[in-house]
Image: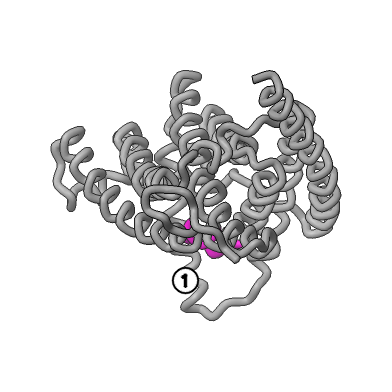
Amino acid sequence: MEQVNSNRLGITDRAGLFILVMLMAAGLVLGGGLSIVAWKIMTGQSMLQMQASLMNPTYVNELRVIQTISALCMFFIPAFVTIWRLSPKPYSYMGFNTKSSFKSILIGMMIMGVTIVLAGALATLNEMIPLTESLKASAKAMEEAYMKQVVVLSNMNGVADLMITLVVMALAPAIFEEVFFRAGFQNMMNRATGKTTLSIVITSLLFSAIHFSYYGFFARFALGMTLGYLFAYSKNIWIPILAHFLNNAVGVIQIYMLHMQGKKIEDNMDDKFPLWIGFIALLIVFFGIKFYEKSTKQDQEKNTKENLDVEVLS
């Protein structure tokens, strides 16, 4: 039976899950409003002018700012507020205070590296699924809109620009999205149902769907599954944050290198792999996660022993 948390609201994790989703919807509206205000302050342009200017590389810094504002309001703030009201120890609940060994962290990063390859093969599989002409047109329109934004954000003219882009496109999304999806949504669902795999699957489906990309759906679902297991076994949110950052950083650096070589991003950005490579990657990820689970169990046993020793000494 689900337990009521010891907090000022006296609510369950199931209720917290509902609150989280509602706050995400509110955050979407709030983020949109604040983005318009920020755009007006930075450029002096109206909302109508904003739509066209977002695809202009001249406004790359403004685009970075409003993307960060939107993600902050939609993901990080709803999760933080919900968990702060849900648990008397919000940082522990989210997994910010959990300790992990270097071995577990290294295994986690290696698993994510292989998952990137698996995601590339799944993107190939995604393209092989037949669609009606209308659905195909809609899917391509979403991809073109995404690629236009990537082209704008790829306007990096040196190492300083690369560092800024890594923060905006790799680090910030990793922190904001992992706090929402893994520390928040998955964590609450797992605590409410006691079903770890089901919680990871549903969270991964939501994680992929929220990116609005048909051709990238399987790839992001696989990334979400790996991130979900990295958190579920370690209870340490920093590991999926670091893994998420690794995945994003690989893309940013690839874009940077193409841009510095004077190549067109949309024509030369290849993140797909053959299906047979994906099958090998899937096997490596599967057994890697098993090995990771054993390593994190050792971490938890060590942490438990250290906590007991501290209690005895005190």
| Residue found at x 76% / y 39% | 296
Count of all numbered marks drawn on residues in the image: 1
Dominant secondary structure of the magenta stretch? loop
- How far from the left and from the top, in percent, is residue 43? 19, 35
Viewer-proximal residue among 314 and 279: 314
Dot 1 alpha-carbon crowd within 10 angstroms: few under 14, some 14 to 19, many 20 or more: few
Q: Is residue 268 above or below residue 202?
A: above
- How far from the left and from the top, in percent, is residue 234? 69, 41
Q: Is residue 116 left or right of residue 267?
A: right
Secondary element type, mark 1: helix
- How far from the left and from the top, in percent, is residue 103? 79, 29
Q: Is residue 282 left or right of residue 182?
A: right
Q: Is residue 225 left or right of residue 192?
A: right
Residue 288 is a magenta residue: no
Residue 277 in view of the camera: no
| Residue found at x 57% / y 52% | 187
| Residue found at x 49% / y 67% | 139
**Type of the residue with mark 1:** Ala
Quadrant housing the C terminus? top right
- How far from the left and from the top, in percent, is residue 29? 27, 55
| Residue found at x 42% / y 38% | 153
Residue 209 is a magenta residue: yes
Magenta residues, start to end: 208-217
Viewer-proximal residue among 70 and 311: 311
